[in-house]
Structure formats: structure tokens, C-alpha cells
Amino acid sequence: MFRRRFAFAIACAMVATIPVAAHDLPQRHVMNAFVKLDEHRAHLVIRVPLDLLTSVRFPLNGQQIDLSTDSAAMQRALDAIAHDVALWEGATALRAANSQGRLSLPSDRSFERYEDAVAHVGEPLEPGTGIYSGQGFLDARFTYPIVSADSRFSIRTLVVAELRDYVKLALRYLPSNGTSSAFLISAQDGRVVLNPAWYQAAGAFVILGVEHILSGIDHLLFLLCLVIPVVRLRQVVPIVTAFTVAHSFTLIGSAYGVGPDGPWFPPFVETAIAATILYMALENILGGDVRRRWLITGIFGLVHGFGFSYGLKENLQFAGRHLLVSLLTFNVGIEIGQLAVLAVLLPVLLLLRRSALAGRAGVVVLSGIVAHTAWHWMIERGQALRTVRWPKMDLVALATLTRWVAGIALAALIAHWIVRRAGAFFSRRLAREHLS
């Protein structure tokens, strides 16, 4: 107990020395669009900033666009948009039966509602309107014949694809019957299904979960810290199970909007994740009790679940009506990735523990390397944390805190039950193997 408290005190002292700094966010170009379905037609109404139409040059009169001679340029612009923003019905690429476009001033706000956007595209420019080159918008409407409004529809944007994630398409999908959906996509997302079936959402989120854990170096380092001093599979199972249950709990809670909110929380979570890695590394160095590791792992897993939720947040738009299925399969993907990592990691650790880094020296050396990395992460991430304004403890914040305390207690009970069942199962299995 003394060693664990000592390690925690060292981690807290390190956090207190974090310097102050701030991070800048990149600016992005955003297009706005609606996809509306009728019984046998699909409508795409889209607003594209003129500086994104790099392949089209409108004729100029001085520094302003010559609106009296822009018909040919307008047709080229419509053709370019129809090519770069494509719709599919199932596996069939849709071709526009007709199209219509106009230029608009930067101050125009017609694209806040679908009906206003459609009406605006059909109106001519007022006489005397002046639009400067590279400013304003090109607003367009495309109509596509479709077989059925109940088909699966997908969309892809390649507008200035070389800028990848820096050009976004903010899309509102309006089916003929059902609830509308909002998307924010880029060229990196490829074809996005607007109304996915449950199995399409499930498959996509399993892959997303695997990719997320394999690309999350902080989560992988935490997993490494958990198993550095562990040499038996019977010890690994309850630890990984506790981590899984805990991060699933906070991940699902955050997706349903019951988690803490505000600009302070993401940097707090990132800093706390680095602190959990540092704590586990220090505990390995000081020789913590591995038999009770599942308990502290479960507590830290709650923090990592919030981290997973931020990685998932922008992708929940692709779940359609299958939010719970997507969350569960995302967790399945994370566990598949964890098992794949452990399948490689455990034999390598076993080999190191039996050769170059045998005994306690191996645990100390490996944990020291991880602790050094986690310490620098805490400093870097804490720079953003110390610049944000912390929330006031009002009734809403107190209610949220109470819900999470109760939820954490429930998650702890569930984890304790699962660990006991898993431990009993493996004990019986080992006993049968020993007798045989």
C-alpha cells in the first residue's frame, strides 16, 4: 500500500510542474449540402465556396466576376461539382437529369434550411450585384432519377481531394420517411453510406475499433505496462477483462451524452491517460501487488474509455439509426486489436524476461522507458489543460457527477463479478489439466 501511494504522490508532483501553453487549430473550408429523397427522385442542393473551384475560372470585369458572360463557366462549374460530389443508389452511380446553379454573396444565409436553399438557387441575381473573384459561393441543385427511396444511398466528395481532411462537406440527409441525419465528411472518408443497414454499420465500426487501438500508442503503452510484470495467462485475463468492462462503460455513456462536457474535459482526459501510464510504470518499478492489479486497471479503464469516445465522436455520424450496434461493435474491434497486440507482446516479453532482461531488472528497465515517455506526454498535454477554464459546480454539474459516481460503482461491481467468474473458470481448467 505504501509503495502504491508513493508512486501516486510522485505522479501528482510531476503534474503540478506542467508549464502553460496553447495549441492552434487549423482552419478548414466547409461546403454545405442537402440530400433530399422523393419517391423516384433524389435532390442534391450544395453550396461550394468559389475558392474551392480550382478547375473553373469565371470571366472577370476588373476584380469582380463578369456576371453577364458567366454561362459557359457556370456549366463547367456544375459539371465539376457533379463529378467531384457523387451519389450512388446501391452500387449504381447516379447521373443528374438536370442541374441549376447561381453565384451568391458571402453574406447570404439561404443554406440554413433545405426549402430556403432550393428557393434561393432558383432565383436570379439581383441587378447590380458585385461578387469579387475568389469570394462568395456557387450554389447548385442536381436532380437524379432513382429506383426507390428505400434503397441504400451513399455519397463521396473529391472537391480539392489533395487537401484531404481540410475540406469538409457538411451534409443533411433528408429521407422521404424517417429521421434526418447530419454528416461532416471529407475526401478521406471515401463513399459514405447515408442510411446504412445494421450489418454495414457493425462491420465498419469493428474495423474502426481495430484501427483505433492499433494507432493509439498511449493505449498500447498502458496495455504494455499492465502485462510487463505478469508471466501467466491466468493473471492477464482478469486484468484485460477489467479494462474492457471499464472503458466500455464510459465509452457508451459518452456516446449517449451523459458524460462531462466542456472545453476543459478533452485535455483533462488526455493528461489523465498519460498519468495512468506513468502510475502503472512506477508501480511496476516499485513492485506493486499484481493480484490486485485488475482493480486499479478497472478504474483507469474508465479514463481510457473517455479517450476512446473522443476518437469515435466524429465517426458516430456513420452509424445511422444503429448507434448501440455501432458502439458495441466498436468495442469488439478494440478487443480484437488488444488480443492481436497481446498475442505478439506476451511471447516477446516472455523471451526478454528469460534472456536479456531477466528478473526484476527487466521489469524496472522496461517500465522506466515507459515512465519516461509518459512523463513527457503529461507535460505536453498538460499545457492545454492549464489554459482552459474549469466548470463551476452548479446543480447540473453536481447531478452529472452523481450519475457517474453511481455508474462507476455499478461498473466496479460488474467487473468484480466477471473477474471472479473468469478466475474460477481458469482455476477449474488448470485443475483438470493438472489431474489429467
Image (cartoon, grey):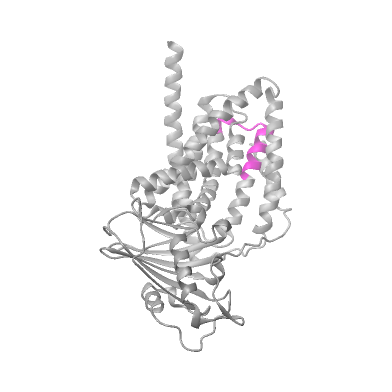
**Residue visible at 61% across and 81% down in the picture:** 63
The spot of residue 112 in percent (x, y) is: 43, 74
Which residue is more in the foreground, 313 or 387?
313
Whether the magenta-drawn stretch holds residue 146 is answered as no
Where, by quadrant of the figure, is residue 50 drawn?
bottom right
The reply to whether residue 412 is in sight is: no
**Where is residue 202, by image quadrant?**
top left
**Residue 304 in view here:** yes
Write the residue at 53% across / 42% down: 213
Q: Is residue 283 magenta?
A: yes
Q: Residue furthest bottom?
A: 128
Q: Please, is residue 368 above or below residue 18 in the view?
A: above
Residue 401 falls left or right of residue 96: right
| Percent coordinates x, y for residue 328 in the rendering | 41, 45
Identify whether 414 is placed above or below 361: below
* Figure check: 432 above or below 78: above
Chief secondary structure of the magenta portion = helix
Q: Where is residue 301 in the image (x, y as percent from the top left)?
A: 53, 43
Q: In which quarter of the image is the C terminus?
A: top left
Q: Nearer the viewer, residue 146 or 416?
A: 146
Please report the bounds of the magenta region as a residue range: 276-292
Residue 429 x, y percent position in the rendering = 43, 20
Residue in the image at 68% along x and 38% along y: 370
